[in-house]
Image (cartoon, rainbow, N blue to C red):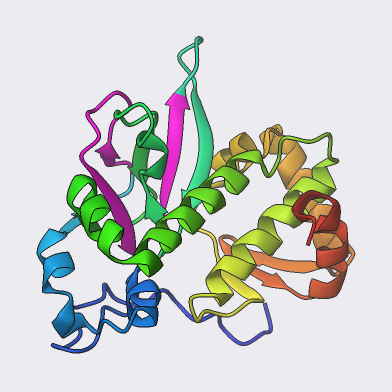
Amino acid sequence: MNYTPYRKQPAPADDGSHLKFCSTCAFSQACLSEGYDKSALMDLHVLVEHIGPFHEGDVIFREGDDFKAIAAVRAGTVKTTVIDSNGDAQVLGFFLPGEVVGLNAIHQNKYPCNVVALDTVMLCRFSFPKMAVLAGKMPGLQAHLFRLLSQDINKASLLAGDYSAEQRLAAFLISISRRYAARGFSASHLLLTMNRTDMANYLRLAPETVSRVLRRMQDSGLIEVDRREFHLAKRAELEALAKPVLRI
């Protein structure tokens, strides 16, 4: 493929400095908006445990486990799955660096799904009971948690409508693109660590349908694909195709 290489995912974030948050911290903006730098947030920092590395296929949280913590992805990608009545895994979503997994466990107080590493994954694990107490003292952090919950709900309902395979796949690519761009990565050159089977499972499509639609998109010049590297060559056209699904 003759295009500038995508910006690869960074190495796992370190602890920054006594003032600076980790580069992929999921909560830094909420804290900074409240006027708290890292040195003023030792209460929060004490709640954080860096865990990993996890490797492809490792189960990080299991469906039915007691809910004690949420986790922010520092590096790598994870998927969430449930096992259906036939014993087959159903993919619910994918989480990128800077995104938080586990919020859907709050209501039942148990993890409602499995969290599985797709590549080499590092996480920050937060004690949720202690974070909830801290959020009560910090309106900005509390509002940020509510926004994360809303995003989680929106992701879950993203593909619930009666959309074509092309619209679903375009929406998936644009959604991933926007999420990477929000974290400082290229919006047009993507590395998708999920395999085609997981992608199809998530989109509620057959794997051969995903392969066929990807070929059509390549033939029409919308995208260029080299294994797991995707170049969104005609982003505006993909945005238009995805609009009925994403709404914006």
Can residue 157 be spotted in the picture? yes
Q: Residue at x 29, y 53 (%)?
A: 71
> Is residue 72 a member of the stretch shown in magenta?
yes
Q: Residue at x 48, y 49 (%)?
A: 149
Viewed as shown, does residue 216 lie left or right of 15? right
Q: Residue at x 68, y 53 (%)?
A: 172
Viewed as shown, does residue 48 lie left or right of 181? left
Q: Quadrant of the C terminus?
A: bottom right
* Residue 158 coordinates in the image, percent (x, y): 68, 44
Instruction: Tell me the magenta residue range.
Output: 57-82
Task: In the rendered view, tell whether residue 154 sits above or below residue 74.
Answer: above
Can residue 120 be spotted in the picture? no
Q: Quadrant of the N terminus?
A: bottom right
Q: Quadrant of residue 196?
A: top right
Q: Quadrant of residue 143?
A: bottom left
Q: How many marks?
A: 0
* Residue 173 coordinates in the image, percent (x, y): 68, 59
Q: Residue at x 52, y 35 (%)?
A: 91
* Residue 135 coordinates in the image, percent (x, y): 29, 59
Viewed as shown, does residue 103 lie left or right of 225? left
Q: Nearer the viewer, residue 2 or 231?
A: 231
> Is residue 120 a member of the stretch shown in magenta?
no
